[in-house]
Amino acid sequence: MPVRSTWKKSRFPSASTSWRRRLSGVGAIVCLLTGLALPASGDVRVDLVDGAIEVSGLSDVFLSSLAHTEWTFEEWTRVLRVAVSSDASPILGTHEVVGASLRFRPMFTFDAGRDYFVRLEHEGQVVTQTVSLPAVIRERTTRVTEVTPTAGVLPENQLKLYIHFSAPMAGGDGLEFVRLLDEAGEPVVDPFLPLGEAFWNRDRTRYTIFFDPGRVKQGILPNEQLGRPILAGHTYRLVIDEAWRDSHSVALVGSFEKRFSVGPADESPPDPENWQLTIPADGTRESLVVDFGESLDHAILDRALSIEGVSGQAEVSRDETRWSFRPDQPRSASEHTLVVLTLLEDLAGNQIGKAFEVDVFEQIETPEAQSASYRLSFIIPPDKR
């Protein structure tokens, strides 16, 4: 393993007194009576081996004296100390004599590409060395795959944007990597609600951005003072910086932009009675297709619709205006039920049967909102051929 090293040596005439206080056992007595010292610094070797610091080139007598002592971690660090710098606290770990070497294994793995300061004190001298593991060079592979809603026209009271990534990200607050620009290229002032890392999905491949609800909802002080973040009749660019890092601390492949224009505010809750259903044929695995007539919230669509008692695969398409469901097994002619959780939202945060309210976050988290449903029956007619 390649190691970058810097050697320094100094002499301390009083070092033997220090060793008399620290060493015990037969090995220590032999060392003191014979006056044996460790080899000169040029013979001592420090390596990183299998994630541990290993010091070789030490005398058998010295190693024996270490092997026959029982020291605390603090006492061990007076002999062999490993830290991130010469004046930093020692890294926690274990010391032991292994064969012809003195070994230090850290409690946590050494970081690739980071320097570590090693200090070895022995009879009459102190040897220091800086070592490091080679830096791991990773190619940029993670990218933004899309921003939803994918529609090119959003309502003036748009509530959320979802940023989708091709691989897990590092987590943390992503707003520092996101800018909203108007048609003149000027940043929109404080359009988003700062929520930190709470709105990553479980595997950190989707990040949710909320437009500030206080500015979106009319009649609220922030709305009256600043107005809505985006305005009907204007165009905007959402710019995502490539400096955003993935779970390997590597930047994105490149930056990403979503351009969109803004239409009138949407104040009407979604109404399943107005949805158009395309019914599959009897005895087939054709998909049931539901056209909403408007774009709905992409993330909630993934879990808000189902066919009661039927397993299969769902797909959202056409700018989140269509949901289709393909069953695992052919369905026979009978009555079926489309189950829709009432927490399903449109782009403005209007839920089924309920217009958007400022405390929308609290509504989403309540058990009642999570379980309430709307049931829409449909019949697969028999094949009369």
Image: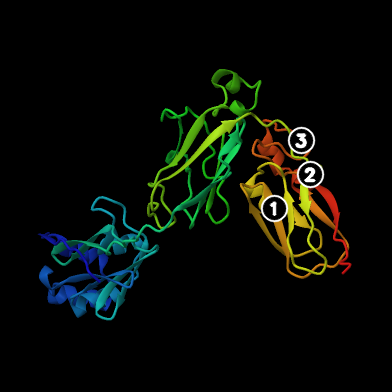
Q: Amino acid at mark 3?
A: Lys
Residue that label 2 marks:
272
The Cα atoms of the two marked residues, 3 and 1, are separated by: 21 Å
Identify the residue at image location x=58%, y=27%. 232
State which tag comes first along the sequence, 3 or 1: 1
Q: Earlier in the sequence, mark 2 or mark 3?
A: 2
Point out which mark residue 323 bears. Answer: 1
Quick check: marks 2 and 1 in contact, CB under 8 Å?
A: no
Residue 203 image-quadrant placement = bottom right
Compared with 77, 101 (above or below) is below
- Location of residue 153 in the rendering, given as x and y in whole percent from the top left corner: 58, 37
- Report the Cα–Cα distance between label 2 and label 1: 12 Å
Tell me which corner region of the image, top left, top right, bottom left or bottom right, holds residue 57. bottom left
Give the residue drawn at x 80%, y 64%: 281
Name which residue type carries label 2: Pro
Is label 3 in contact with label 1 (beta carbons under 8 Å)? no
Q: Nearer the viewer, residue 292 or 76?
A: 292
Residue 252, compared with residue 261, is above or below; it is: below
Q: Is residue 214 above or below residue 344?
A: above
**Quarter the N terminus occupies:** bottom left
- Name the residue beneath numbered marker 3: 354
Rendering coords of residue 130 (x, y %): 21, 60
